Image (cartoon, helix red, strand yellow):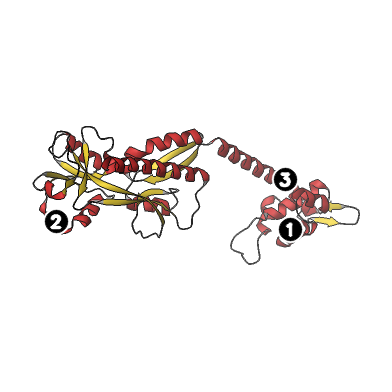
Amino acid sequence: MNSLHAAPLVMMMSLCRFPSDEASMQIDFLGMQAFLCIVEQGGFLPAATHLNLSQTAVSHRLRKLEDSLGMKLLTRTTRAITLTDAGRALLPRVRKAMQELELSYDTVRQHAGSAPHWLVFGCLPTLAATQLSPALLRFATQHPDISVRVLDDSIGEIAEHVHNGTAAFGVSLASSNRFGLDMDVFAEEPFVLACPPRHRLARAREVDWERLRGEPLIRISLPAGNAATIDDALGDRRLQFRWAYEAQHTSIALDFVANGLGLTVVPALSATRAPGVVTRPLAGPSVARHLAVVTRHGAVLAPAAQAMRDLLVAEIRDRLAAVHEQRA
């Protein structure tokens, strides 16, 4: 009798390695599946039918397993297929291993079916604070089973989220980035002057920058790059204005304005819901930023992500259209 007939599975598996990789054990699951199926189905042909493979493919898998073990598991005659001593030793352990694997797979699949599905995307804080809610409400009616995580971060952080796959897409500014992301520019957002309702400029049809000389201005050094956009538009003229305060975030600057500390220049949409503040168009020069959807190069968005992207873009475009109508 072959001395391996009572060998434990560990001994069998210790032999199941590819000749080219003596340093690590590699389990031949496809071979074990074929072996188990041949025994349980009663032959190569029914096993091939059950596995939706050709009979040649099933034979190849078994032969590969036997070669890696260095012993025969089955003997095949014209009338029957019988187990060798090694095959009998291996069979119950392979059967148990496959059953445990199927149970684990089913457990994971059930968890995936019950776990919440998440959609993650990035959005500039100045847009997230004012434009997201209507789009999210519409999205919730279309995809009630999908939870949404919004990463309201700076331009650079959004680019990094999209690049590493943390976010499906980002609503940001059209700018160069070190990741080579695709950018779909979809709108131009003007900057406006924000002032208290009773300020002398609150009723002006349009405010020229020259009229801001001497006024206490609030600079926003937001990582989104708004200060840089204004500086680029003004050039050296920026040094001629009185920047009395500086804030890190647009919401803080708008609160300063509402409380009479000064005036500020912000993207139009960021001030649409600011209490105690009115906005006026700017001229001489006008300032604007270009909004874009950023995605990984060549990436195709999943249907839910595409739907969220389209809803948000449509919401922003509609709000900007209303801003332009007011200016006209």
Q: Is residue 321 left or right of residue 86?
A: left
Among numbered discs 2 and 3, the one appearing first in the sequence: 3
Q: Circle 3 — which element?
A: helix
Residue beneath the point at 44% across and 45% down: 309
From the image, state whether disc 3 or disc 1 is nearer to you: 1
Determine which of the numbered discs, if any, sits on residue 95 in the image.
3
Q: Nearer the viewer, residue 272 or 91?
A: 272
* Residue 287 screen position, x and y as percent: 24, 51
- Which residue bears the numbered disc 2? 237
From the image, state whether disc 2 or disc 3 is nearer to you: 2
Q: CA distance from mark 3 to mark 1?
A: 17 Å
Q: CA distance from mark 2 to mark 1?
A: 77 Å
At label 3, which amino acid type do we have?
Answer: Arg
The outermost residue toward the front is: 328
At label 2, which amino acid type do we have?
Answer: Arg
- Which residue bears the numbered disc 1? 61
Circles 2 and 1: CB distance less than 8 Å?
Answer: no
Q: Circle 1 — which element?
A: helix
Q: Is residue 259 left or right of residue 62?
A: left
Quadrant position of residue 61: bottom right
* Residue 33 screen position, x and y as percent: 72, 51
Residue beneath the point at 16% across and 41% down: 263
Q: CA distance from mark 2 to mark 3?
A: 80 Å
The outermost residue toward the right is: 79
Among numbered discs 2 and 1, the one appearing first in the sequence: 1
